[in-house]
Amino acid sequence: MSRFQEHAFSGQKALVRVDFNVPLDDQFNITDDTRMRAAVPTIQKILSDGGSVILMSHLGRPKDGPTNKYSLSHLVAHLSALLARPVQFAADCIGSAATEAATRLLPGEVLLLENLRFYKEEEKGDVGFAEKLSTLGDVWVNDAFGTAHRAHASTAVIAQYYPKQARFFGLLMEGEVISAERVLHQSEKPFVAIIGGAKVSDKILIIENLLDRATDIIIGGGMAYTFWKAQGKMIGNSLCEEDRLALALDILKKAEEKGVKIHLPMDSTIADAFSADAKTTNCESFGIPAGWMGLDIGEKARADFKEVILRSKTILWNGPMGVFEMEKFQAGTKAIAEAVAEATQQGAFSLVGGGDSVAAVNQFGFTDKVSYVSTGGGAMLEYFEGKILPGIDAVNA
C-alpha cells in the first residue's frame, strides 16, 4: 500500500494539483472528460477519510490573464455530477477569494480554484506564487501526471512549503509512475516497443533510451519512410526527414550492435494524395512509386507486427501506424490495438501512452483491454527518454 493510501486525511485540507485541461466546444461543453474522471478516485479517497479537497488546475493557454473561454467555472457542473456532491468555485486561485473559500471549507466539501495560468507566475515557477498557493492546504497532493514534466509553481516549486510527510502522489500519478517504472526498469522479456508517428526527430531520444532495454522495436507511421530512404529505398512522396537520414542509419547500426531487432513495415497502404478520398493500393514500403505516399502500414506489416507483439511479455506503444483519423488509413493502427489487447489477455503487461495512441485505443474500444493507458503524453515521452520529471522529483525529494 502506498503512502497516499495509508494516510488518513481526516480533518485535513488537501490541496490537490489535478490535470483538468479538457477540451471544450463553443458552448463550453466538455467533449472529453477522461482527465477529470481519472482524478475522481484520489478526490474520493480524501473525502471518504473525512478530509476536504481544494483542486487546482490549468486549462488551455491563456495569453492575457483571466479570460472566460479558459475559466474553470465551466467545469463545475460536470465535476459536481462526477463526484455526486456540490463543488464550490473560487473566482481566483490566490488572494482573498481563494483564501476565504478555503478557510470556510468543511470536511467532505470540494473547492475548485480558478485557472492557475491566469497568472504568468505559474509557468515561470515563481516561488512567491507557489508560496501563496501553499497556504491554502495542510497537505499537497500531485495527481497531474500530464504536467509532471514541467517545473511549474503548482507542480513542483510548491513542494518546498510542505514537509516530506505532507507531500503525496495521488492515485492517478502513482499508477502512472508504477506502470512506467515497470516497463522501463522491471520489464519482462521479450520487450517490444511500438513507436509510431510522423517524425524520427520527435522520437529519437525515446528510441535511443529503449535500445538498452527492449528486445524488439517496431517502427511505423510516417517516420518509417525516413528509415527506408536512409537505406537507399524508393519511398515516392512519403513523409521523410531528409536531415535525419544519417541518424536513422545510426539507430539501425546501434540496434544491431546491441542485439535489438528493429522491425520496419515491409508493405504500406499507399495513396495518390493526402486525402480521405484518395486512390489507394498496397505495395512494398521500399518500392513506392513517384507520386504516391505511404499513409498506413500494409497487410503483411500488420501480420508481421502482430507476430512480434504476441510473443512479447512487455509492450510499450507510443504513436499510430498511419493517418488513422481517416478511415481508409486506420487499419494498421487498429490491428496494432487488437494485437496489444490479445497479448495482454495472454499475460503480457502493456502500457499505451501519447495522445494519438490513447485516442486510437479509445476510438477502437480497447481502453479496458490493455494494462495501462497513460494520461500524460509529453510527460510519458520525457520519462521514457530517461529524463527526471520535476513533478515526480518534487514529491520524492
Image (cartoon, rainbow, N blue to C red):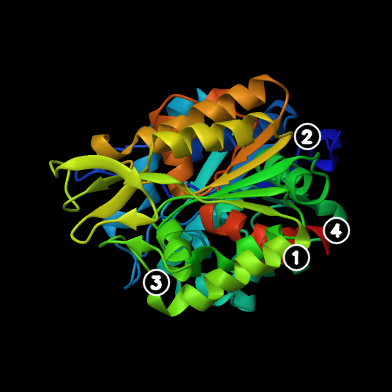
The residue tagged 4 is 164
Gap in Å between the C-alphas at discs 4 and 1? 44 Å
Q: Are marks 1 and 3 in contact (CB under 8 Å)?
A: no
Mark sitting earlier along the chain (3/2)? 2
Q: Residues within 10 Å of mark 3 (few under 14, many from 20)?
A: some
- Kindly identify which numbered label has been placed on residue 241: 3
Pair 4/3: label in front: 3
Q: Residues within 10 Å of mark 1 (few under 14, many from 20)?
A: few
Q: Are marks 4 and 1 in contact (CB under 8 Å)?
A: no
The residue tagged 1 is 257
Q: Front-most of 169 and 350?
A: 350
Question: Element type at marker 1?
Answer: helix
Gap in Å between the C-alphas at discs 3 and 2? 56 Å
Gap in Å between the C-alphas at discs 4 and 2? 18 Å
Where residue 122 appears, as percent x and y from the top left, is: 52, 70
The residue tagged 2 is 10
Instruction: Indicate the quadrant where residue 352 lies.
Output: top right
Pair 4/2: label in front: 4
